[in-house]
Image (cartoon, rainbow, N blue to C red):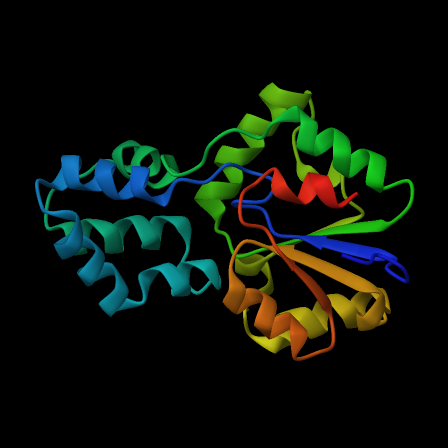
Amino acid sequence: MNLSGIKHLIFDLGGVIIDLNPEATYTSMERLTGRPIDQWLSGLHESQLFTDYEQGFLSDSEFRDSVRQIAAVSLTDTDINKAWNAMLGAIPRRRIDKVVELGKTYQTFVLSNTNGIHVSAFNETLQLSTGKPTLDHFFDKVYFSHMMKMRKPETEIYQTVLGENNLNPREVLFLDDKEENLKGAEKLKIQTFLVPSPDSWLELF
């Protein structure tokens, strides 16, 4: 890929900076509820719980209450947090070190569809990995969907990042592991790179 003219990098988190395994959460919920994964997922998708939570339409406690209602079993906050966070893996230091290196040449951002429970969890992982409590120590600016009340791949979320930072979209490279998110960015003429595995973007630079 030709990086000529690129001045700004926008990174997704899950599957790009953070190792991600959604099946681990599904398996954890199956074990907690005693219900097959497909039944549990069907209830979640029908309720739009994931998307509403990622857009900040539900608080952490409201999300947990909704999970309890869909699961139809008694679950503690800790039970739900552990299962929900099971999908979050490591934040290898090599990726953070690369971001720091790239920050000397490019302006760097995070743009992630995420939520309050996950942010608390990966901040703990980040602290253990790097000694720093948040991603703000490594990126110029961090954008989370639940704080913005919008989510990828809606064009509004990309427009917000571009506008707030006065970015020319043709000078921006957006890295994400989901093709639909890239397509949303491409509608605004943002350059994109599909990340098939978390370390694959390291080879770009």
- Is residue 90 positioned above or below 17 on the image? above
**x and y percentages locating residue 190 in the rendered image:** 73, 70
Please give left or right for residue 61 compared with residue 88 in the image. left
Please give left or right for residue 74 compared with residue 205 in the image. left
**x and y percentages locating residue 133 in the rendered image:** 65, 29
Q: Residue at x 46, y 59 (%)?
A: 54
**x and y percentages locating residue 83 in the rendered image:** 30, 37
**x and y percentages locating residue 58 in the rendered image:** 40, 60
Q: Is residue 24 visible?
A: yes
- Is residue 102 positioned above or below 129 on the image? below
Q: Residue furthest bottom?
A: 187
Please give left or right for residue 169 compared with residue 152 in the image. right
Q: Is residue 151 visible?
A: no
Image-quadrant location for residue 42: bottom left
Q: Nearer the viewer, residue 29 or 57?
A: 29
Image-quadrant location for residue 41: bottom left
Q: Residue at x 13, y 56 (%)?
A: 39
Image-quadrant location for residue 91: top right
Q: Residue at x 68, y 33 (%)?
A: 95
Q: Nearer the viewer, residue 103 or 177?
A: 177
Q: Residue at x 46, y 32 (%)?
A: 89
Q: Quadrant of the N terminus?
A: bottom right
- Is residue 104 positioned above or below 53 on the image? above
Q: Residue furthest front?
A: 1
